[in-house]
Image: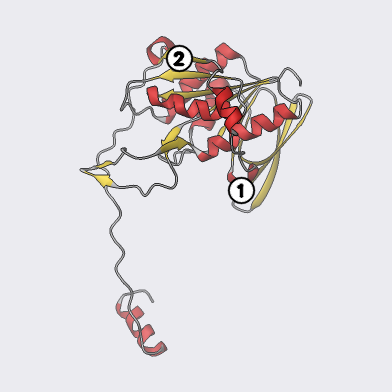
Amino acid sequence: MSALRILVPVKRVIDYTVKIRVVNGAVDTNVKYSINPFDEIAVEQAVQMKEKKLASEIIAMTVGPTKSAETLRTALAMGADRAVHIEVPEGTEVQPLQVAKIVKAIVEKEKPGLVLLGKQAIDDDSSQTGQMLAGLLGWPQATFASKIETAGEKLTVTREVDGGLETVSASLPAIVTTDLRLNTPRYASLQNIMKAKKKPISTISVKDIGVDITPSIEIISVSEPPKRVGGGKVADVDELISKLKAAGAI
């Protein structure tokens, strides 16, 4: 188990604190960006496993434009050893299936024993990449992990489901997607931020990967939800029932 290498795909997304605005039929992207929160949890889990001597190396990777290197620096400052940047042209949207195919190519090159990634990205909320990657590789998967335990060449994962918690086991190599309650990501110290600047990032053009990133789904339009209409007050229960009946609610 000491030789386990962990690959952690991360994504650059609009920061979760930003209020999303739609301008001229598109999301305003002239805002603050940061690492996807669920991917940050995956990085933290990998670092904790290395601290417990359960892993030997952590490789962060991302698919995105030049600015996505900032996201990799965050992962490196948290404790990843090195990073791989699959660079795509600015403004290019890479959809989940294409991302899964790119990650598969990196898996075949790096030969990790475990791929840890967030259960979803907060920009598109697709929650598809991990599952698609497992299907492409033919590896076992455990999604929405809230607890991960290792024993030899096996993982035991507690995952959140609608009815509560479910515990599953899988043999390595495997794919695990992380949920919100798995851990609390650490803040990178100034010292580690400075060290991260010296850690290696390999930049590879998506053309060299040989994956067609042409979108398979076309976005027709983007619009904000309609504004909520203000509520009203009623004098008593009888008036409330009357209004509900008039609205067809009862």
Residue 14 versus residue 157: which sits nearer the camera?
14
For this view, does 195 lie left or right of residue 50? Answer: left
Disc 2 secondary structure class: strand
Give residue 213's position: percent from left, percent from top.
36, 21
Residue 39 visible in the shown view: yes
Q: Residues within 10 Å of mark 1 (few under 14, many from 20)?
A: few
Give residue 199's position: percent from left, percent from top.
56, 18
Say which residue label 2 marks. 203
Residue at 27%, 48% in the rendered image = 223
Residue at 43%, 30% in the rendered image = 96
Give residue 195's position: percent from left, percent from top.
58, 23
Which quarter of the figure is the N terminus placed in? top right
> In the image, what residue type sits under mark 2?
Thr
Work out which residue is located at the far right of the displayed protein and give it. 152
Number of callouts: 2
**Label of residue 161 in the image:** 1
Q: Residues within 10 Å of mark 2 (few under 14, many from 20)?
A: some
Work out which residue is located at the far left of the displayed protein and give it. 24
Q: Quadrant of residue 210?
A: top left
Give residue 204's position: percent from left, percent from top.
44, 13
Q: Where 211 falls versus 41 (above or below)?
A: above
Residue 16 versus residue 181: which sits nearer the camera?
16
CA gap between label 1 and label 2 equals 38 Å
In contact (CB < 8 Å): disc 1 and disc 2 = no
> In the image, what residue type sits under mark 1?
Val
**Label of residue 220 in the image:** none
Q: How is the image coloured?
A: secondary structure
Q: Where 164 falls versus 176 (above or below)?
A: below
Mark nearer the viewer, 1 or 2: 2
Disc 1 secondary structure class: strand
